[in-house]
Amino acid sequence: MTTQTQAPEQVPARFTTTHRALSDALKTVALGIADRPLVKVLGGVMAETADGALTLRGFDYETSVTVRVDGEAGPDGRSLLDLGELKNVLAAAVAGEKTADAARTPVTVDDGVLSTPDLAVPLGTLPLEDYPAFPPDVPAQVTVDGAEWFGQVARVLPAAGRDDTLPVMTYVHLRIAGGVLRLTASDRYRVTVGEVKAVEGGRAETAALVPAWLLEKMAKLLGKHTGPVVIGVDGDWATLAVGAVTVTVRCTADVSKYPDIWGLIPSDALPLAVRMDREALARAVRKAHAVSKAKLPKEPLVLLEFGPAGVTVSPGLRDETAQARVRGVVVDGETLAGADLGAPMAVDGLFLLDALGTFAGPTVTVHARTPLKPYVLTDGDAVTGDGFVHMLMPMRVER
């Protein structure tokens, strides 16, 4: 843990920017500031002016965030402002204004006073000498296209673990090797693997575990970024630079403890493969899940019965006599490999809907081996996918 603190700075930061620019920057820098900090000083946002540029920074001992902000910066200086108060005062300063007018309102912070053309309000400041030193950014190892990066992040995140029963699964596994950045997420019941080709670098092999929550929030705040994303990993820390934002996160989880799940993903064609209209399949699964939940609120399931021309999607019932009277939704499909599974495959309807949502094309191909073995969804016909694979476990049904 970093124990050094900031050297005292006698000159406070002075800067002028727009309300929109400052508000957006505060939303992003909050990634590195705890909602309920253990000590008050960690609830501060560091405003720094240097060489005519303005940056806002936050650090909670685990995540460091730096945001460059457009505006006019005064002499080199530094101020530690209370983030909660700053956000509240900033919002209140444009109360009653139309959204467009509020966005372009000039805001100046000078020696702990926030002012607009209408008013000036003193802000609470925190002691600089008590604030921890920021960790150094990790040197760049790979540069990828921002649109491709955030696209694959969005696709892999639905499979990331959400609880702490197995903490290592709440991370996304990043592996850089051979000019490819691979992202893997799993909650033990499903696995997603996405790949992004390097624009620059990425030849040397390295790996790290990055918190899924952090990638999720970064995608929400920065997901429209289409420029380069620069990533560096050194084992203890990982740095992701996205335009004007740089995030350095401590890699607290041991990457060697992440399960070797890549060997579970089939590399050879499975005996059954059916290409279907993605929206039609999602519509059928949504209906079947809703009916099953209406009949069995605590344990709904969906049955997939593959035939020569597609799949019949039915609500699953625990009673065999009742199940025999169920008529499901037939989804037409093109059979690429038509092995008979011998029985319907029981699946978690919500997991399957989440999986279908990670695809954007008009069709999706379902690959399966048996009703009890993992099944795979891909964009194209190959079970290995085209840079992305979503694998799920079926459900076991006891009647």
Image (cartoon, rainbow, N blue to C red):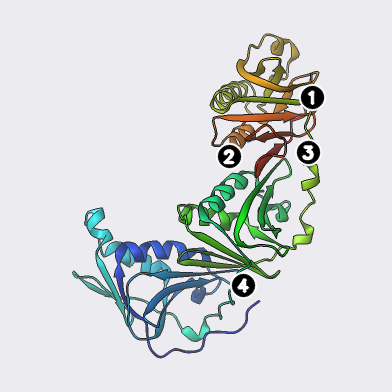
- Which mark, residue 398? 1
The amino acid type of the residue labelled 4 equals Val
Residue that label 3 marks: 266
Q: Position of residue 183 (x, y in %)?
A: 66, 52
Q: Is residue 399 left or right of residue 101?
A: right
Q: Residues within 10 Å of mark 4 (few under 14, many from 20)?
A: many
Q: Earlier in the sequence, mark 3 or mark 1?
A: 3
Q: Nearer the viewer, residue 23 or 40?
A: 23
Disc 1, SS = loop
Q: Are marks 1 and 2 in contact (CB under 8 Å)?
A: no
Residue that label 2 marks: 358
Give the residue displayed 61% in from the left and 15% down from the top: 330
Q: Nearer the viewer, residue 340 or 10?
A: 340
Q: Are marks 4 and 3 in contact (CB under 8 Å)?
A: no
In this rendering, the answer to whether 15 lies above or below 96 is below
Q: Position of residue 332 (x, y in %)?
A: 61, 17
Instruction: Give the distance between the C-alpha atoms of the residues marked 3 and 2, in whole angstroms.
Output: 19 Å
Q: Is residue 41 left or right of residue 106?
A: right
Instruction: Give the distance between the C-alpha atoms of the residues marked 4 and 3, in whole angstroms.
Output: 35 Å
Q: Nearer the viewer, residue 305 or 207?
A: 207
Q: Are marks 3 and 1 in contact (CB under 8 Å)?
A: no
Give the residue displayed 78% in from the left and 30% down from the top: 270
Q: Earlier in the sequence, mark 1 or mark 2?
A: 2
The amino acid type of the residue labelled 2 equals Thr
